[in-house]
Amino acid sequence: MAELETVEVYNSRTEAELAKGYLESEGIGTSIMADDAGELYPSLGAVRGVKLLAKPEDVEKAKALLKERK
């Protein structure tokens, strides 16, 4: 499995999923990592954060795209 790096940390899975969809529409593959008990306890995302991950070579471009979008 390839190493992934954090692009952004969100308070909810929903926010992370929206960013994931946007980045993937721009050609950047991403994954989400959240310790929310398999989405059974979404409030844990606000406490621990929901990470949006990408390949190291895509992280800077992903961050720039997300920053432009804000």
Image (cartoon, rainbow, N blue to C red):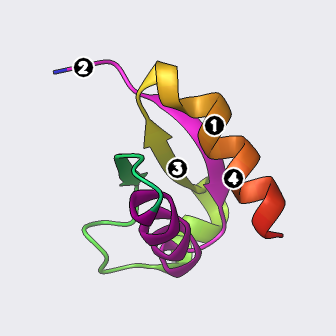
- The reply to whether the C-beta atoms of the residues labelled 3 and 4 are less than 8 Å apart is no
Instruction: Name the residue beneath numbered marker 4.
Output: 65
* Disc 3 from disc 1: Cα separation: 17 Å
The numbered dot on residue 61 is 1
Tell me if residue 33 comes above or below residue 19 in the rendering.
above
Instruction: Name the residue beneath numbered marker 2.
Output: 2
Mark positioned earlier in the residue sequence (2 or 4): 2
Tell me if residue 68 comes above or below residue 17 in the rendering.
above
Q: In the rendered view, does 17 fall on the left or right side of 7?
A: left
Mark positioned earlier in the residue sequence (3 or 2): 2
Q: Residue 68: where, in percent of width, then height?
A: 81, 59
- The reply to whether the C-beta atoms of the residues labelled 1 and 4 are less than 8 Å apart is yes
- The reply to whether the C-beta atoms of the residues labelled 3 and 1 are less than 8 Å apart is no
Identity of the amino acid at label 4? Answer: Leu
Q: Residue 69: say if magenta.
A: no
Instruction: Name the residue beneath numbered marker 3.
Output: 51
* Disc 3 from disc 2: Cα separation: 16 Å
Q: Quadrant of residue 70?
A: bottom right
Mark positioned earlier in the residue sequence (3 or 1): 3
> Across the whole image, how many numbered discs are drawn on residues?
4
Identity of the amino acid at label 3? Answer: Lys
Tell me the SS state at disc 3: strand
Kindly report which numbered mark, 2 or 1, lies closer to the viewer in this rendering.
Answer: 1
- The reply to whether the C-beta atoms of the residues labelled 2 and 4 are less than 8 Å apart is no
Kindly report which numbered mark, 3 or 1, lies closer to the viewer in this rendering.
Answer: 1
Q: In the rendered view, does 28 fall on the left or right side of 46?
A: left
Range covered by the magenta-colored residues:
2-25
The residue at the point 59 percent across, 75 percent down is 15
Identity of the amino acid at label 1? Answer: Lys
Tell me if residue 37 comes above or below residue 55 in the rendering.
below
* Disc 1 from disc 4: Cα separation: 6 Å
Q: Residue 2: where, in percent of width, then height?
A: 24, 19
